Structure formats: structure tokens, C-alpha cells
Image: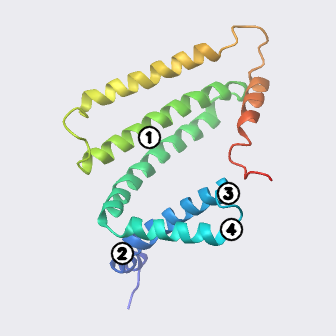
Amino acid sequence: MVFSIQDLLFQLESVGVYDYLLPFLLIFAIVFGILTYLRIFGDNKGIHLIIAMVIGLLGVRSNFLTQFYSEVFPRLGIGVTIILVIFILLGMFIAEEHKTYWMWGIGGIALIIAIVVIIKTFSYLGWDYGSYWGEGSITWIVFAVLLLALIIAVATSTGGGDSKPSSNAAAGAGKFLGVFEPKRK
């Protein structure tokens, strides 16, 4: 008997791995990570574990969450693929000293992709709360995001002076390096 990867994936789907186990693990890992990082209950990992398990199990109890995951993650995968292609093209054709400015542009594109993914997912699941999330709304949202990015760019610009974009970028990036590190005692 020939056994393919497709058969294995169908078997995993039939026993509920995609609908229950993977969403549970995702919610559990995120909640456990947040609780461990914030240390709300000190360093007591047992309490973090119990809270993360309860929230994860309550989350997958209904089809509400699994429906959302089955809609949002394929769209998110497409968005991440688009950003990856842009990164590859950026690495091939843009000089190193200009990459800092292009990264801000890619960040803007990523934000637009995230907004579109969320709006399309909400719309598909019927969470649009009326007809005001139409095609014209996406245009206004994109315009508002670009206008906000322009305002931020103008407000944070130095207005001339020294022209070392790579050193300024490294200094700016250093401010954010500690954001995702665990808190020290």
C-alpha cells in the first residue's frame, strides 16, 4: 500500500490536530510566554502553566476560534510570502547604505498587508458589522496609514546635518533591541 504525505495530513485533520491541538498549542505558548515575561505571579511557572492551559482549552472549546484561525493564517501566509519576496529583491538590488530607508517602506507595506488580512478575515467570518467595510474603506485605511507614516517621517527627521544613515539607523535600532528580551531582576 502506498502511503503519501497527503494521506498523513488528511489523517491528522480527521483526528482534529488542525482544529484543536494546534490552536491550543498556539494559545498556550503565547499566554505562557506573556505570563513568564511579565512575571505577574513572580517566577512561579506552575501558575503560569495552569493559566495558559485553562485559557488554551477554553479558547478551543468552540468553533469560533478554530474558524478564525483557519481563515486568518492562510491569508497571513500569503502576506508573509509577499514581504519575503520584497526582502529578497531588496537584498539583491539595493545598496547597503540605502537599506535603512527601504526597511521603513517595507514596514509600511507590512502594516498595510496586516490591515488587509484582518479586514478580509473579519469580513469573511461576518464580523464586519455592516456595509462600511467595503472596498472604499480599504482605500481610506491605506491613505490614512500612508499619511500617518508621512507625518511621523517628517516629525522625526533631523532636517539635514550629518549624512550617515547607517550610523543613525544602528543607533535607532539599538533603542529597540531590549524590547523583546526577558526582564532582569
Q: Which mark is residue 44?
A: 4
In the image shown, does 48 or 159 lie closer to the viewer? 48
Identified at 34% across, 55% down, the residue is 71
In this rendering, the answer to whether 75 lies above or below 167 is below
Q: Is residue 1 left or right of residue 83?
A: left
Residue 107: image x %, image y %?
55, 33
Q: Secondary structure at mark 1?
A: helix
Q: Examine the image and state in which quarter residue 20 appears.
A: bottom left
Marks 4/2: CA–CA distance:
35 Å
Q: Earlier in the sequence, mark 1 or mark 2?
A: 2
As shown in the figure, which amino acid type bears the numbered disc 2? Glu
As shown in the figure, which amino acid type bears the numbered disc 4? Asn
Q: Which mark is residue 13?
A: 2
Marks 4/3: CA–CA distance:
8 Å
Q: Which residue is mark 1?
A: 114
As shown in the figure, which amino acid type bears the numbered disc 1? Ala
Whether tag 1 and tag 2 are in contact, CB under 8 A, the answer is no
Q: Secondary structure at mark 2?
A: helix
Which is closer to the viewer, label 3 or label 1?
A: 3
Q: Which residue is mark 3?
A: 39
Category of crowding for the residue at label 1, using alpha-carbon neighbours closer than 10 angstroms: few (below 14), some (14–19), many (at least 20): some
Category of crowding for the residue at label 4, using alpha-carbon neighbours closer than 10 angstroms: few (below 14), some (14–19), many (at least 20): few
Marks 3/1: CA–CA distance:
29 Å
Which is closer to the viewer, label 4 or label 2?
A: 4
Identified at 37% across, 79% down, the residue is 7
Residue 97: image x %, image y %?
73, 25
The quadrant the N terminus occupies is bottom left
Q: Earlier in the sequence, mark 4 or mark 2?
A: 2
Residue 83: image x %, image y %?
51, 41
